[in-house]
């Protein structure tokens, strides 16, 4: 294959332009940087008081922080997983005032004054929640990445009364994806707890 030829004229033109940029006055460069910074969103702190797993937290949070990032990055509660970060996989499911929510789509500011329960707060000390026990007994997981979100949704599914049939369980658990395909064990776990 023949190498592209660079003409002397092209080389001289590019060299001249590069040299010209080196001589731009510092005042012009600083004005450009200042103008550029006008378009960068500035952080805005918000006082936040929230109970997470029955422990009260008083924090200062950026208004753009998601509940998932607050849990994982600020409070080191890493049980809730960041799967898709678009609300499509359910790995980040937590309970807010007893209702299941996708924490990657929930701003931390939205849980002001509310009770958040994560997978870490589901057990009672060393005593596993019945749903956690059922997942172990019924082999409701494989790799385990989606399991915290699956368990949180499963607890809500039972509480909401959506356990009348396998089809109903599948319908109300459809927001939680398992790439390993442990769905049969998940359904059995929910049925066991519902009984």
Image (cartoon, grey):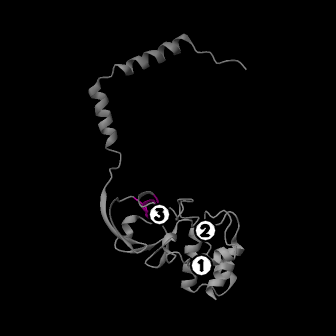
Q: Tag 1, which secondary structure?
A: helix
Q: Position of residue 39 (x, y in %)?
A: 34, 45
Q: Which residues are magenta?
A: 65-72
In depth, the one of 5 and 48 nearer the eye is: 48
Numbered-mark total: 3
Q: Is residue 3 left or right of residue 63?
A: right
Figure quadrant of residue 17 = top left
Q: Residue at x 46, y 15 (%)?
A: 15
- Return the disc, 1 or 2, that comes first in the chain's sequence: 1
Q: Tag 3, which secondary structure?
A: loop
Q: Position of residue 100 (x, y in %)?
A: 50, 75
The residue at which mark 2 appears reads as 147
Q: Which mark is residue 77?
A: 3
- Quarter of the figure that contains the C terminus: bottom right
Q: Are marks 3 and 2 in contact (CB under 8 Å)?
A: no
The residue at which mark 1 appears reads as 131
In depth, the one of 40 and 100 nearer the eye is: 100
Task: Inspect the magenta stretch and tell me whether residue 149 lies in it.
Answer: no
In depth, the one of 6 and 92 nearer the eye is: 92
């Amino acid at each position: 294959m023949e190498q592209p030829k660079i003409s002397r004229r092209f080389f001289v033109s590019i060299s001249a332009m590069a040299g010209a940029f080196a001589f731009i006055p510092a005042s012009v460069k600083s004005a450009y940087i200042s103008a550029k910074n006008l378009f960068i969103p500035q952080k805005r702190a918000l006082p936040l008081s929230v109970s997470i797993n029955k422990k009260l937290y008083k924090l200062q949070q950026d208004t753009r922080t998601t509940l998932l990032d607050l849990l994982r990055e600020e409070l080191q509660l890493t049980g809730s997983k960041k799967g898709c970060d678009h609300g499509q996989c359910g790995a980040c499911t937590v309970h807010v005032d007893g209702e299941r929510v996708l924490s990657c789509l929930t701003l931390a500011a939205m849980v002001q004054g509310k009770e958040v329960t994560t997978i870490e707060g589901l057990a009672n000390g060393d005593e596993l929640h019945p749903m956690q026990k059922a997942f172990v007994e019924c082999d409701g997981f494989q790799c385990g990445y989606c399991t915290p979100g699956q368990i949180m949704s499963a607890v809500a599914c039972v509480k909401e009364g959506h356990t009348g049939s396998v089809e109903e369980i599948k319908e109300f658990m459809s927001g939680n994806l398992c790439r390993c395909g442990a769905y049969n064990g998940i359904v059995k776990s929910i049925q066991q707890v519902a009984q």
